[in-house]
Amino acid sequence: MKVVKVNSYEEMSAYIAERIACQIKEKPQSVLGLATGSTPVGAYEKLCEMYKENKVDFSCVTTFNLDEYYPINPDDKNSYRYFMEEKLFSKVNIKKENINIPSGNAPDAALECKLYDEKLEKSGGVDLQILGIGVNGHIGFNEPADTLCSGTHLTELAKETIASNSRFFKNELEVPTHAITMGIGSIMKAKSIIIAANIKDKKEAVEKVLGGNITTSCPATLLCAHRDVTLVYYG
Ligand code: F6R
């Protein structure tokens, strides 16, 4: 694992945005795996600026988001669909038909997961995956457990995740209890992965990743078995 320690959130965001822009420059038809949450917001802002300055072109890019609450209406301000539209998609020239996010209001979650994996497979797979890390070491919404799922699946959010994500809602009771998430297998199939963190908030989880021992009780440690992962962190 390549480890990049930077001094600030701004530097981390610039690093991620630059890597995404280089990926798109090298391969205009890139498939990007994207995350939501606080971690990538600065990188998305930077990419929007780069787009305005004609430094990056999303016209041939395809994206797959890691996860979405379930159930949730895609128009809900707390949906990840809304988040992505607001932070990135509405501000760059990505084609609507190239955007993939699990549907929070699909009537049949199991079918939605199956179709998502099929689309992912058909796309040729993710070239560059961006990940945040949960306080409990989750990636996507693959929460610590004895066994982890390989493909896209419906999952119950861990108590720590609900508590942490309640900052976006009125209170903890409003946080959806479930989500559809890409599985560990889908994440590990990405050709390149960047995992980003503020080490102050995620100290325990990041230290486990840096320690190199793989355990399903900290799903991010599985990344230690991937051949092209960059951990970028500050704090
Ligand atoms: C979000 C996701 C989650 C977050 C993680 C960190 O799409 O998959 O794994 O990356 O919970 O969240 P933040 O960045 O808000 O600390």
Image (cartoon, rainbow, N blue to C red):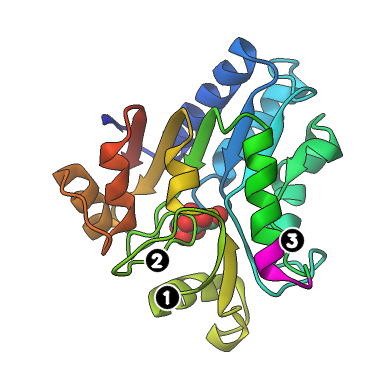
**Looking at the image, is 217 positioned above or below residue 100?**
below
Tell me which numbered mark, 3 or 2, is placed earlier along the sequence.
3
- Provide the residue designation for mark 3: 103
The residue closer to the viewer here, 39 or 162, is 162
Which residues lie in the magenta part?
Answer: 107-111
Taking the spot 82% from the left edge, 65% from the top edge, the residue there is: 75
Residue 54 lies, with reference to residue 137, above or below; the image says above
Q: Earlier in the sequence, mark 3 or mark 1?
A: 3
Instruction: Determine the residue located farthest toward the bottom in the rendered image.
Output: 173
Q: Main secondary structure of the magenta part?
A: helix
Which residue does the numbered mark 1 point to in the structure image?
158
Across and down, in percent, residue 76 comes to 78, 69
Which mark is on residue 143?
Answer: 2
Q: Are marks 1 and 2 in contact (CB under 8 Å)?
A: yes
What residue do we see at 56% from left, 56% from top?
152
Q: Amino acid at mark 2?
A: Glu
**How far, Cα to Cα, is label 3 from label 1?**
21 Å
